[in-house]
Amino acid sequence: MTELTAKTPGAGIFPFEIGGITAREETPEAMTAIAPYKGREAEASAALEAAHGMALPAPGRSTGKAGARALWFGRDTALLIGPRVDASLGRHAALTDQSDAWIVVRLEGAGARDVLARLTPLDLREGVFKRGHTARSELAHMAGSITRVGPEAWQIMVFRSFARTLAHDLDSAMRGVAARAGA
Amino acid sequence: MRITCPLCGARDRREFYYSGAAVALDRPAPEAGAEVWDDYLHNRDNPAGVTRDMWYHELGCGSWVVVTRNTVSHEVIGTALARDEKGRGA
């Protein structure tokens, strides 16, 4: 019988490092979209808090911390990243398993912002896009999610099938930034 | 051109899909008659000045946004979620 091996979306593609900036794949155990039923946002948020220790994030924000994070993920939707969602959430929200749908990459290093600035029209300036802020936006012509997880660290997500395209565009942007810096 | 999404804030026009005049907010009743439906489906104003359009924030939050803008000065005067505007008249 054939032995099948599960591969992560970025297997054989990530990680790589250019000019001191690293692009590394993150492999959370689970990702679940949480879309509260109409008028049930407060109950869903309380259930998320009770089960996973974080409230539902407001638009453009994330809650929780590394390893168990909830991102605002579009209109009336949050994405729980890390733990498998507790069944109690199902009473107040539609839950959709997204675990294998996205590639998650951590872009880190001095100048990571300049790399992203080449790929997205978002305003990523220091006082505007702060730690914990998140956005759905265009990332090299792909629909993506960008979250600032540290002073020089960003979590970026696109659909799994775009992993190689993302790596290619990151590579070009990172080379450009490194060339500008004279690295 | 930047459009302020009521949820996401000021965003680049690239994130939005343009749908056209905001008539869909005021869909006629099924029995409104052929003339009203003909007008709804086919007849559009082409104003030099203030107009209201529907834009879809497809690369952002997924909201339909009603944008009030001036076609002469290109000024974006205001934006609102279609959810909040529906029924108020286009």
Image (cartoon, helix red, strand yellow):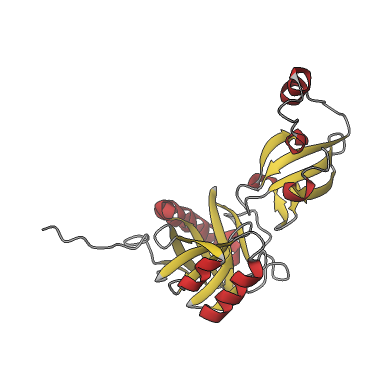
Residue at 56% over, 75% down: A47
Q: Is residue B55 above or below residue A165?
A: above
Residue A140 lies, in percent from the top left, at 54, 51
Residue A107, position as x, y percentages in the image: 50, 68
Q: Name the foreground residue: B90 vs A67.
A: B90
Task: Please determine whether, in this image, residue A27 is positioned above or below residue A49.
Answer: above
Query: Vertically, is B48 above or below B75?
Result: above
**Which of the 4 image quadrants contains residue B87?**
top right
Which residue lies most toward the left here? A1
Looking at the image, the residue that sits furthest to the front is: B31
x and y percent of residue A160 in the render? 41, 55
Give the number of callouts.
0
Q: Quadrant of residue B32?
A: top right
Q: Residue at x 60, y 75 (%)?
A: A63
Is residue A56 visible in the rendered image? The answer is: no
A142 relative position to B22: left or right: left
Quarter of the N terminus of chain A within the rendering: bottom left
- Residue A174 visible in the snapshot: yes
Q: Nearer the viewer, residue A7 or A23?
A: A7
Residue A127 against residue A177 in the figure, above or below: below
How far across and how far down the image is residue B22, in percent?
76, 36
